[in-house]
Amino acid sequence: MIRISGYTRKQQGITLFGLIVWLAILGFIGVVAAKVTPTTIEYFSIKKAIASARTAGTTVQEIQNAFNKQAEVGYIDAIAGKDLDITKNGDDIQISFAYEKKIPLAGPVSLLINYAGSTAKNP
């Protein structure tokens, strides 16, 4: 004899449609991360290069040349030495930069990132 009880068990899990949606979301995040990572690495390379250039020279031209040498070695294409803002306050030399990076994603959709940095100490 088969007993039928009032207890029904609810199914759990993910549907095929749900799986496809989640994979599409994760794929989009992966593509964005793969396209943004090189620009972020370049930004940190620029920050290291301006710190190095700051100690390498005392005049604007020397600092720009030192940065250009570092940029050539570090594969920096976003800015050049002429794009740096170099100011001197007494004996303290401050170097700053700012640039935009436009990353195409798909068709007319792109991502615009504003990068900026300086050798100034944050208070």
Image (tube, grey):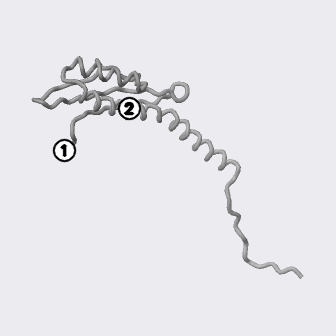
Image spot of residue 58 (x, y percent): 19, 23
User: Above or below — where is 1 with respect to 24?
Assistant: below
**Residue 1 screen position, x and y as percent:** 89, 82
Identify the element where label 2 is drawn: helix
Numbered-mark total:
2
From the viewer's side, name the closer residue of 83 and 45. 45
Q: Position of residue 4 (x, y in %)?
A: 81, 78
Q: Amino acid at mark 2?
A: Ser
Q: Tell me if residue 49 comes above or below residue 122 in the rendering.
A: above
Mark 1 residue crowding within 10 angstroms, few (<14) / some (14–19) / many (20+): few
Q: Quadrant of residue 9?
A: bottom right
**Could you say which disc has been placed on residue 42 in the image?**
none
Name the quarter where the C terminus is drawn.
Answer: top left
Q: Residues within 10 Å of mark 2 (few under 14, many from 20)?
A: some
Q: Which residue shows up at 63% across the image and 44% down it?
A: 23
Residue 60 in the figure: left or right of residue 115: left
The quarter of the picture where residue 107 lies is top right
Q: Secondary structure at mark 1?
A: loop
- Name the one closer to the observer, 123 or 55: 55
Residue situated in front as seen by the camera: 54 or 27:
54
Residue pointed to by mark 1: 123
What residue lies at 24% left-to-right and 19% top-to-bottom?
62
Identify the mark at residue 45; answer none if there is no mark. 2
Residue 41 is drawn in which quadrant?
top left
Tag 1: residue type? Pro
- The residue sitting at the right extreme is 1
Identified at 32% across, 33% down, the residue is 47
Which residue extends farthest left?
90
Closer to us: 121 or 1? 121
Height in image: 37 above or below 87?
below
